[in-house]
Amino acid sequence: MTFGSATVLRDVTMDVRPGEIHALIGQNGSGKSTLAKILTGLYRPDAGSRVMVDGADLRLPIRPDESRAAGVGVVHQSLGLVADATVLENTRLGRFQGSRFLRRIDWRAEAEAIQAVFDRLGPRRIPLDAKVADLHEDEKAVVAIARAVQDLAEGGGVIIFDESTRALGRESLERFYGLLDRIVATGTSALLITHRLEEVVEAADRVTVLRDGEIVVAGQEVEGMTKSDLAHLMLGREVEGLDRRSAAATATDAAPVVVGGLVGRNVRELSLSILPGEVVGVTGLSGSGHDDVPYLISGVSQAEGGTVTLPAGRVAFKGLSPATAIRNGIALVPEGRETAGICGGMSVTENISFPQTCAGRASGKVRPLDSGNEKRRAAEWIERLDVRPPWPHAMLKNLSGGNQQKVLLAKWLATDPALLVLHEPTQAVDVGARKIIVEAVRGAAREGRAVLVAGSDENELALLCDRVLVFSDGVVGRELTGEFTPHDIVESIYTDSSRAKLRERNPQGVS
């Protein structure tokens, strides 16, 4: 596959066997996304390329209607659901069958058709009239999977998961494994394109590794492999491990950032203090409230009450706007960089300089975007975070996901915040980018910033944090301090929650 004079994929040949879960991994820029876009019809491959499903050739470039008819289902990275539409409307969109004479949609028949698909996926019930916006993340994933598998004959075809689990926490991931097992148990194949190496170890039968556009490992059995083994295959070198962060070095007389009585969506009376140089984590099950904390503190979501005390003074959360939060030294690195964090049609320099530019315009001091100061700032952060390619004027949409995440982090570190708030900071990035991002967050703390990390990755939290607050039903149920492990975090989440505990993977599906 070539773009102009640049070759992105070279002689990529792989097979996915009936009834197997086949993982495709590679670091950012390895060619995974390009291959996924070829298989889903977004890109036209070079002449001589060939794609076969169940022994039949697909015409290239692949057309969505023809691929569905041939038995190819796709669950996209963003799931591709319409938030304001119902479950039924999302799953049957593009497939509605009108009545023979009146050409009206037979809603009862449509509901029966998709309910049969949900029944194949397991006994868990999702109301067909529910709005997708009101569903939990794992329920949204089930809806996207149902939409994809409804066109597949039972026991045939292949379903492609293109980074589809990026937003799933541990509890939801276990449910996803159950769905995956149900699908392949009938003989349908699954291609799992992922950054999450634990998914490969826990769920896949075989793995193929892309590096610099070429396959370096083709269909190797996963049994007995570790995440370190997979990382080595991806990068072509041993990955230097990240040690657990040492205790925060803070001055005893340093004034902490103090959050008092924060009340908002799913959060009840949160109070905490974070010393400059300290990293505090918040976690919990989906819906427990920890995911809402970053957006309430930064003014993105409206709080009902509470205050935060910063070096700039005390600020009330009620009525707080993002602009006011930024002016007072609060910076938010949100989850979902594509929709909430970056401007893909702008350059790396423009993205990094965006907060300062907006602040200048708000104060009436409009200045050219490509000033020497902005170029120097961008070049400094490109070097510090090893953004690749290291081109200040590159369009951000043309960078890999891991490098986009580095630019997003650089944008807010460049504002020199007193409180750095991050939500799932290493979601959907490869192990190399993850190491750089973790070190950058640690560096921000060493430079005297208070850091708050909201996340569901227990390994990341154990690496980064001095303390971890475990949420349950909107309040902090437990605080972990001192020497704690990822296992301690998981145990605290499920011990303190009144909801269902973590269960073992069940090949027969989920309840």
Image: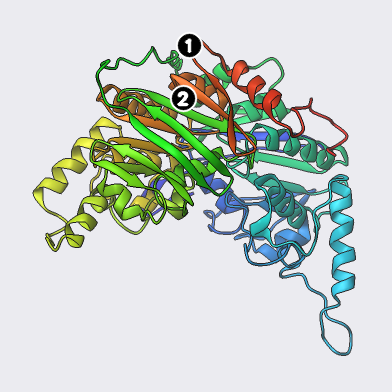
- Residue 389 appears left or right of 171: left
Which of 121/254 is in front? 254
Residue 387 can be seen, yes or no: no
Q: Which mark is residue 235?
A: 2
Q: Determine which residue is flagged by label 1.
A: 482
Q: Residue at x 38, y 12 (%)?
A: 247
Q: Tell me, what colour scheme is on the image?
A: rainbow
Residue projecting furthest to the top? 483
Q: Residues within 10 Å of mark 1 (few under 14, many from 20)?
A: few
- Residue 366 appears left or right of 51: left
Q: Position of residue 63 (x, y in %)?
A: 65, 64
Identify the secondary structure beneath mark 2: helix
Q: Residue at x 77, y 39 (%)?
A: 180
Q: Is residue 472 above or below residue 83?
A: above
Q: Position of residue 445 (x, y in %)?
A: 31, 25
The quadrant holding residue 199 is top right
